[in-house]
Amino acid sequence: MTSESYDFVVVSNRLPVDYEPDASGGAAWKPSPGGLVTALQPVMRAADGVWIGWAGKAGLDLEPLVADGMHLVPVPLSADEVELYYEGFSNDTLWPLYHDVIAQPRYHRVWWDSYVQVNRRFADAAAAAAAPDATVWVQDYQLQLVPGMLRERRPDLTIGFFNHIPFPPYGIYSQLPWRTQIVEGLLGADVIGFQRTADAGNFQRAVRRLLGYQTRQTEIHVPGDPPRTVIAKAYPISIDSASYEELARRDDIQARAREIRADLGNPKTIMLGVDRLDYTKGIGHRLKAFGELLEEGRVAVEDVVLVQVASPSRERVETYRQLRDEIELTVGRINGDHSTIGHQAINYLHHGYPRDEMVALYLAADVMLVTALRDGMNLVAKEYVASRHDDDGVLVLSEFAGAADELRNALLINPHDIDGLKSSIVQAVRMSTTERRRRMRALRRRVLERDVALWSSTFLGELEASRRR
Ligand code: GDG
């Protein structure tokens, strides 16, 4: 544990670096910069802050370190805790429950016990690292008890929480045996951020139903001595838009995009899906729609190819193993039925790729398919738009992704409506250049203006304002 203290503390399940022991028995830290790191790095530097999280490998007790100019405090997790708190409660109870029970959530008391224990460890680490009156920002569903635990120990702190995934309607949320404890845990924060206004509304309803507290617009009145006002509100997350545009303008990445097109046989239309292999992403619905379009002859395998990047995810959770089997069976069937020697219907890639390659794929894709059944935001949709500095390309976007609240100029679809999805795919394939440009320009204005730096500064600004309330 660190003996130093900091005015700004970020707490998330994972640290923004991966711990990779090398062959010689030494250790290496590999930065894994995502949007959150990009957004928070300037704030961390200015406030000389610290990031608290798990290093991604079980059973390691590591010393605090400095990587990429950031102070990092690793929180250890045992192999059992990875199984119970992380794979179990976080990914097999909360994840399916918060995504509208697309898969069946599993409720196990030992998983919950581990969740409480691990949340306490994160809260202890944050309490130890935070200077008097510091600001602490807790991230995501794995750590929903941390705000309450922290407030108990350290009432001097200003505490923010951001939920990256949806918050479900009360009718679904109320299944959770520990529904009251979680709501109470979250209410330890001064500001609770959600992706969509609907998520904030669902949370407020759960508070009213479970605790009977009064809410007014974004305010929740929490009785006590002293009574507190907690803000629950939407702060839609975004990406580092400029860096995607910058990559997309690079000559080597544009050359790679042309190479991808050529390798695919220069088809008229390349459609692209990029998702973690997760049942929330609607990959099966997308494949079904494409398969039927080929079957009906509304698109031809010589003209249209679907590239599906399905990056490996949560492979130790049974539901994810089953999903992989289902998807791969479907891809095999569609390819078997419709591919020809020279033309493969679906190019399925079960790999993760470097960001450069992702941007080249975005540039190569005429149509981007985001068909999530439920998604907090969906950053892939925003990354596609940010990369299209040529004002071309069509985004087909599920109305069940948070991004649909902002990206109104996409072709919005209901992925459960396979006929509707098929029509939108055909519309995207046939769309005129003029309409593509008009829509993409509008989308780009939005994504370039509202980037991840604006997201974090807005959230932290409101958190700062809550100090004065
Ligand atoms: C959660 C919420 C919310 C994917 N494959 C590769 C790769 N990726 C990158 C994408 C994108 C990120 O991973 C995925 O973000 P999404 O937003 O699409 O989805 P989740 O992982 O489910 O994220 C989501 C998000 O949190 C943020 O709040 O939007 O709703 O579920 O950045 O590009 N990146 C690389 N190679 C891959 O193969 N380099």
Image (cartoon, rainbow, N blue to C red):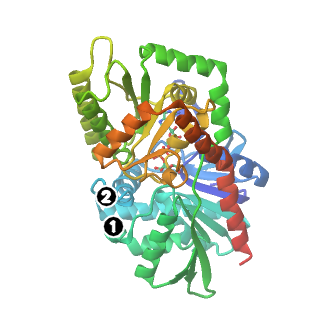
- Where is residue 26 drawn, in percent x and y? 57, 30
Pointers 2 and 1 in contact (C-beta within 8 Å): yes
Toward the viewer: 5 or 59? Answer: 5
Residue under numbered circle 2: 101
Horizontal side of 403 relative to 247 (left or right) equals left
Instruction: Give the quadrant of the C terminus.
Output: bottom right
Q: Amino acid at mark 1?
A: Ile
Give the residue pinned by disc 1: 172
Quarter of the rendering containing residue 356: top right
- Label 2 and label 1: CA atoms lie apart by 8 Å
**Disc 1 element:** helix
**Residue 232 drawn at (x, y percent):** 56, 70
Label 1, residues with CA under 10 Å away: few <14, some 14-19, many ≥20:
some
36 and 285: which is toward the camera: 285
Res. 242 image quadrant: top right
Badge 2 amino acid: Val
Judge the density around disc 2: few (<14), some (14-19), many (≥20) Cα neighbours within 10 Å. Answer: some
Residue 147 image position (x, y, % from top left): 56, 68
Residue 79 image point, x, y percent: 40, 47
| Residue 451 relative to residue 283: left or right | right
Residue at position x 48%, y 18% from top? 261
Q: What is the residue that sits farthest to the top in this orientation?
A: 341
Q: Is residue 23 left or right of residue 458?
A: left
Which SS class for mark 2?
loop
- The picture quadrant where one finds residue 359 is top right
Question: Earlier along the polypeptide chain: callout 2 or callout 1?
Answer: 2
Q: Can the viewer see residue 324?
A: no
Using the image as rendered, state which of residue 207 and residue 218 is in the foreground: 218
| Residue found 23% across the figure and 30% down from its top | 296
Q: Residue at x 31, y 23 (%)?
A: 300
| Image quadrant in which the N terminus is located | bottom right
Asked if 328 appears above or below 47 in the picture, the reply is: above
